[in-house]
Image (cartoon, grey):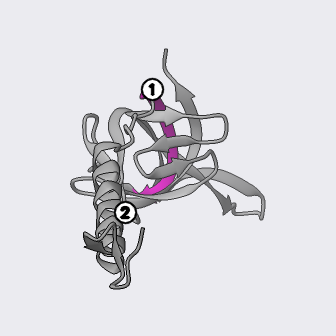
Amino acid sequence: MIDKQGRLFGKINIFDLIVILILVVIAGRVVYVKLNVPQVVAPPQDKVTIELRAEVLNPVAEFVKVGQRVTDKRTGVYLGEIKEIEVTPLPVAVAGANGEVIWADSLRHVEVRMVLSNQGTVTENVYQLGALGVRVGERITLVGPQFSFDAYLTALSKEK
């Protein structure tokens, strides 16, 4: 099979044959990887409702409007569009004339409750909005067109 000059069947050098086989295997591997790209299947998107509450300064609350788009400041992920907004006075304890505690509305702060609507992936453990997983109780810095403040996520629901 291999003669005195190191040729296989007297035709090709054995080292040349090994180099050719290695090149064919490498080329085959490249073609296999290029042709067998796994299909990326997007998870189903659900309509998600997010409720947030925040204590903000009175002037800041005036800039929050229904229909505005809200994002997370830290990640830049779109959280949703404001569907509902409710601004209520924030009660504070004030000492009365004879020492008793009187509850009065704060002149500086108000409580803002807002409901956002967005598309997301709902799993058993987390509500996923883009790259951001959200859970009830988290503090999120909201950014809108004319406002930025911290709010607490108080409710999550999947619309049907």
Label drawn at residue 73:
2
Question: Is 47 covered by the magenta stretch?
Answer: yes
Residue 158: image location, x then y, percent: 53, 25
In the rendered structure, are the residues bearing label 2 and label 1 in contact, judged by CB atoms less than 8 Å apart?
no
Horizontally, is 131 left or right of 70 in the view? Answer: right
Q: Residue furthest left?
A: 145
Label drawn at residue 110:
none
Viewer-closest of 122 and 24? 24
The quadrant of the rendering that contains the N terminus is: bottom left
**Residue drawn at (56%, 47%) of the image:** 153
Q: Is residue 20 in view? A: yes
Viewer-closest of 117 and 124? 124
Residue 112 occupies quadrant = top left
Residue 41 occupies quadrant = top left
In whole angstroms, how far apart are the C-alphas of marks 2 and 1? 23 Å
Residue 4: image location, x then y, percent: 38, 84
Q: Is residue 59 in view? A: no
The amino acid marked with disc number 2 is Lys
Q: Earlier in the sequence, mark 2 or mark 1?
A: 1
Q: Which residue is mark 1?
A: 46
Q: Which residues are magenta?
A: 45-57
The answer to whether 121 is drawn above or below residue 34 in the figure is: above
**Residue drawn at (27%, 43%) of the image:** 69
Instruction: Choose mark 2 or mark 1, whichever is in front.
Output: 1
Horizontally, is 116 left or right of 95 in the view? Answer: left
Helix, strand or loop at label 1? It is strand
The amino acid marked with disc number 1 is Asp
Residue 53: image location, x then y, percent: 52, 46
Provide the major secondary structure of the magenta segment: strand
